[in-house]
Structure formats: structure tokens, C-alpha cells
Amino acid sequence: MDACEGVWRRLVDERRLPREDWCLLIAHAGPELKEEARALACAIARERFGKAVWYRGIVEFTNICRNDCLYCGLRRSNRSLRRYRLTHEEIVAACAGGHAAGMRTFVLQGGEDPALSDAWLTELLSELRTRFPDSAVTLSIGERSRESYERLFMAGASRYLLRHETADPTHYAHLHPPSQRFSRRMACLRDLREIGYQTGCGMMTGSPGQGAEQLACDMVFIQDFRPHMIGIGPFLPHHATPFAQERPGDAETTLFLLSLCRIVLPEVLLPATTALRTLLPDGCARGVLAGCNVVMPNITPETERPAYMLYDGKPVSGGVRETLANVDAELSRIGCGLVSGRGDHPLMKHEEGVRASRPADAARAGSLKSETALVAARAATRTVLAEGRPAGASALAERPYADRQQS
């Protein structure tokens, strides 16, 4: 048995590795071992979630960003980009269309727009919770203060996606200007987890300056941090960035990393990302076969989608129902299907009664009234051990997307 095979067996047995072993596995795994990893990850996902794939709606509500990330088409220095910010009414309308199609999680994603005050966001969250009390709201709006994260959590956001991009500080500095610090990104992720959010991290594969050593750092971080969600997609260049001429990441590395994440964290929520589906025509199915259990169709108004161009070639067309029907048909060819529901992490139980009883003033911006209120809010999404299938999964399995269209 060669060294790589020995490392692989240790990973299967222990679900974690030291950095040097991760580096060896990522650098030297051959096609047979990668296929074995894919098959195991797929089997783990089927055991935990059955053939169900959750679907969430992404609303890209602002492309204004104060940051200048070297890889991103929304970077501050891109003067050719038409900037926009959706109104509350436009965001609620987009979510209403998704809700009518069965979506019960809305991912509000945007750049680090300086106009996104706590007051603006908490008012929006209040509107969404009033209109869609059966749905979860995920925020993905970058780095903020711990106090801001607490206020948004109190207002009803239960999940937060903040991609770490790379767990190697030197590599992080290669991808970002000096004003954006690796230590700050890690501190934000720790704050989110401590507050009680279902917390997501993630990275690009094939980004400039990345090799097996950097990916090994990512895997060590993931196995130690144990996020509830992980977003992994290939690096894809944008013409108006310093990395415009860099080669894109490859799909096979992305799929292998997805499988490794599923093996390390069997219950993690793992999306087949838009970037993967941009690179591969059958990226949704390939992602699910590699261990993914989430897809996130875009429900942003079609008039604004061309202006949210993180990378060249990002899809911008397609209505909600048309997109869902196409994805469901793609998944049906591999024996899976879309399932409607909140799709919480299996070890996180949603307790609507606790959240619904919050005092109104705790949901608004401004200072938190008391530490007691924050503790109560945390309790609403506190991790509890759940046996068997994810909470609510048996009921949700009776409402696949295809059946919804007939009712």
C-alpha cells in the first residue's frame, strides 16, 4: 500500500488528517482514489439525506462593494460596472416569487455595501419574517462588527455565509489588498459561530497562487471549525480584475474537494455552486454525485443579474420555475430530486416559537436591550443532537418539487 493509499484509509477511519497528510492526498490522489472518494461521499449523503436535494433562492440585492478583492468582478476599482441596490419592496417581491415555487430559504447576497446599515437590514428582515414565517433567511454580506451580527441574528437571520477564501494567511494576502486582513476574516467567522448562526465558509479551487499546500490548510480549517455549510467552486476569472489572464480552476479538483468535505463532515450542507455549474453543463448532477445536497437557483430580478458578474460567463437568464424544472430534470437522471423546505443543518433544530416571542425592540437596530435577549435568541437555533434523519425530513420528503407543481 503506497503512502497516498495509507493516508486515504486513515481519513476514512478518522475523518480528519494533519496538514501534511492532506497535502499528500490532494497532490497525489489518482483517478481511482478520487472515484473512491466520490462514491463514498455520495453514499454518505444518501445515508444522511436520502435522494433529496434542498433548493434555496439567492437574491443578489446589491453589487456595491467597498472592498477591492483582486479576483472579484464587483471590486471597488471596477469603474465600468453599473451599480445597483434593490429596494426592500423589490427584495420581498423576489422572495415571494421563490416562495410560490416552494423555496423556504432565501439567501440575501451582496457586496459590502456601506449603505447596508443595521437599521436598513433589520427592517428588511422584519418584513421577510412577517411575509414568510415558514422560511429561513441566510445573509451573505461580508465582514461586519460582532454587534452588527448580533442585531441581525436577533432580527431573524438564522444563517450566514462568509467564505474564508483561503486558510493560508500568505495566500490570503495574495488575493486581497493590504486593507483586508486574514485575521479579521477568521474573527468574523468565529463571532458568527459563537452568536448561534448556522455558519458557512468556503473557498475557490484553482485560485492564483493556490497549490496543494494551500488546499491542505483549507481542509485543516474546515475539519477544526466544523461549519454548518461549505461553498466550494472553481476560480473563474473576470476581465476587469488583476487576475483577468489567470487560468480558471478545474472541475475535477473542485469535485474532489467537495467529496472530501462530505467525508469529513457527513451532515454538512454542501451546495453545487453556480461557479461549478458554469464550468460544467451537468455541474448540478456531478456535484450531487460528489456529495452535494443543496442547489441555489438565482431569483434576482433578471434586469439586474448582468450587473452581478462576479466572474465572466456567470449565467444571467432563466425564470424561477423554468430553472427549477431544468435542475429537477437533471437530478432525476441520477435518481435524485429537489425537495422544498427550510433545509436546516441536521444538528440544528428550528424552534419557531422561541424566535416569534422576541420583544419587538430587540429586532430593530440600535443597542441590544440586554444580554438575556441575545441568549434567548441563540437558544432558538442552539445545536441539539438529533437522531436519524434531519428534523422535518420525513415530512419534506413527501413534498418533492415535481409534486408541488401538480398541487
Image (spheres, rainbow, N blue to C red):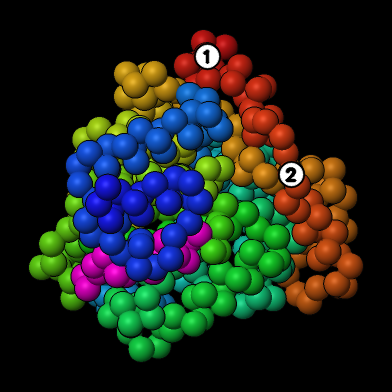
Q: Which residue is mark 2?
A: 385
**Magenta segment:** 207-223
Q: Which residue is mark 1?
A: 403
**Residue 18 figure quarter:** bottom left
Please provide percent x and percent y for residue 115. Answer: 53, 73
User: As drawn, is 353 to the left or to the right of 118?
Assistant: right
User: As drawn, is 149 to the left or to the right of 11?
Assistant: right
Please provide percent x and percent y for residue 173. Answer: 33, 82
| Residue count near mark 2 (Cα–Cα under 10 Å), binned few <14, some 14–19, many ≥20 | few
Q: On screen, 401 above or below 150?
A: above
Please tell me whether mark 1 or mark 2 is closer to you in this view. 2
Q: Earlier in the sequence, mark 1 or mark 2?
A: 2
Callout 2: SS: loop
Q: Residue furthest bottom?
A: 178
Q: Nearer the viewer, residue 54 or 168?
A: 168
Residue found 59% across the figure and 37% down from its top: 343
Q: Nearer the viewer, residue 267 or 135?
A: 267
Q: Quadrant of the C terminus?
A: top right
Q: Nearer the viewer, residue 133 or 32?
A: 32
Please provide percent x and percent y for residue 298. Answer: 40, 43
Residue found 20% across the figure and 63% down from its top: 238
User: As drawn, is 295 to the left or to the right of 357?
Assistant: left
**Residue 327 figure quarter:** top left
Residue found 40% across the figure and 88% down from its top: 179
- Report if residue 211 lies within the magenta region: yes
Q: Residue furthest left?
A: 245
| Residue count near mark 1 (Cα–Cα under 10 Å), binned few <14, some 14–19, many ≥20 | few
Residue found 49% across the figure and 82% down from its top: 183
Which residue type carries mark 1? Answer: Asp
- Report if residue 76 lies within the magenta region: no
**Residue 244 figure quarter:** bottom left
